């Protein structure tokens, strides 16, 4: 499986484009905000003749959904996410203002295509992703595990030597720690963790070195 990583918008969100030899692909957390970012993502998809099968979001905080509607309109897809984060779409502009951002007249609220839950399997090409419901950063946070390649896309749950913040609406530090300990830390130590922000890490490294949840 090929993994193309983009870092988008002022909050530095990692957008992941996964594809294989069939040219079918998924996009995780399309976060392109500026016009040139949206063009970069779209051009990469078109230049590589990729066919988007799924638009996936680890959670629905505003910074992770900026590019959803652009892809949805281009490819006729709705975003797939967990229903417990639906409330976050009620006041996207208000969330942005808290971080000093203005969306102008743009409507970032995406159309939901499919709800995700624990144990769901997402397929594209010859690949499959398993969905883990991993609340804490937000109640509807999910992670996507690719067992064959030994990697997991954790959103804002687990970072390199860090964890997601839990002081945002309906966040829970207790739930976040439980999600990491019962879902992430049960994966093989060699599993690569692709986070919503910052560099990749591994489960083994975080068990030993993470100051918030390390052993």
Image: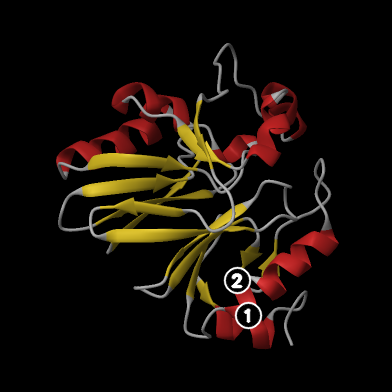
Can I make out residue 54 in this image? Answer: yes
For this rendering, which residue is in front, 141 or 92?
141
- Label 2 secondary element: loop
Q: Position of residue 178 (x, y in %)?
A: 76, 68
- Quadrant (top left/top right/bottom left/bottom right) for the C terminus: bottom right
Residue positioned 29% across, 40% down in the render: 52
Residue 150 lies left or right of residue 39; in this view the side is: right
Query: Is the Cβ of the residue at disc 2 closer than 8 Å to that at disc 1?
Result: yes
According to the picture, the residue beneath numbered tag 1 turns out to be: 206
For the residue carrying disc 2, how many other residues have a C-alpha within 10 Å: few (<14), some (14-19), or many (20+)? some
Give the number of the disc on residue 160: 2
Q: Is residue 151 left or right of residue 149?
A: right
Residue, far top? 105
Q: Residue at coordinates 72% horizontally, 23% vertically from top-left? A: 91
Residue 47 or residue 122, whichever sits in front: 122
Q: Position of residue 177 (x, y in %)?
A: 77, 68
Quadrant of the rendered image containing residue 195: bottom right
* Element carrying mark 1: helix
Left or right of 67 on screen, residue 196: right
Which mark lies nearer to you, 2 or 1? 1
Residue occupying the point 75% across, 77% down: 213
Rendered-image quadrant of the N terminus: bottom left
Vertically, is 124 above or below 2? above
Side of 135 where 206 appears, left or right: left
């Amino acid at each position: 499986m090929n993994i193309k990583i983009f870092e988008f918008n002022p909050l530095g969100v990692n957008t992941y484009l996964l594809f294989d030899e069939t040219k079918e692909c998924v996009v995780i957390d399309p976060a392109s905000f500026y016009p040139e970012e949206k063009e970069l993502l779209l051009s990469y998809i078109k230049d590589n003749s990729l066919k988007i099968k799924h638009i996936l979001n680890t959670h629905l905080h505003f910074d992770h959904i900026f590019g959803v509607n652009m892809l949805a309109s281009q490819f006729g897809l709705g975003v797939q996410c967990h229903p417990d984060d639906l409330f976050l779409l009620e006041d996207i502009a208000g969330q942005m203002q808290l971080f000093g951002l203005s969306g102008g007249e743009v409507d970032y609220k995406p159309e939901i295509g499919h709800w995700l839950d624990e144990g769901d399997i997402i397929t594209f090409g010859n690949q499959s992703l398993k969905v883990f419901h991993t609340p804490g950063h937000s109640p509807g946070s999910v992670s996507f595990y690719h067992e064959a390649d030994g990697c997991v896309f954790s959103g804002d749950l687990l970072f390199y030597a860090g964890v997601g913040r839990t002081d945002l609406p309906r966040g829970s530090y207790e739930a976040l720690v439980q999600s990491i300990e019962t879902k992430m830390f049960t994966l093989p130590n060699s599993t690569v963790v692709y986070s919503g922000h910052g560099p990749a890490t591994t489960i083994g490294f975080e068990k030993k070195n993470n100051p918030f949840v390390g052993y």
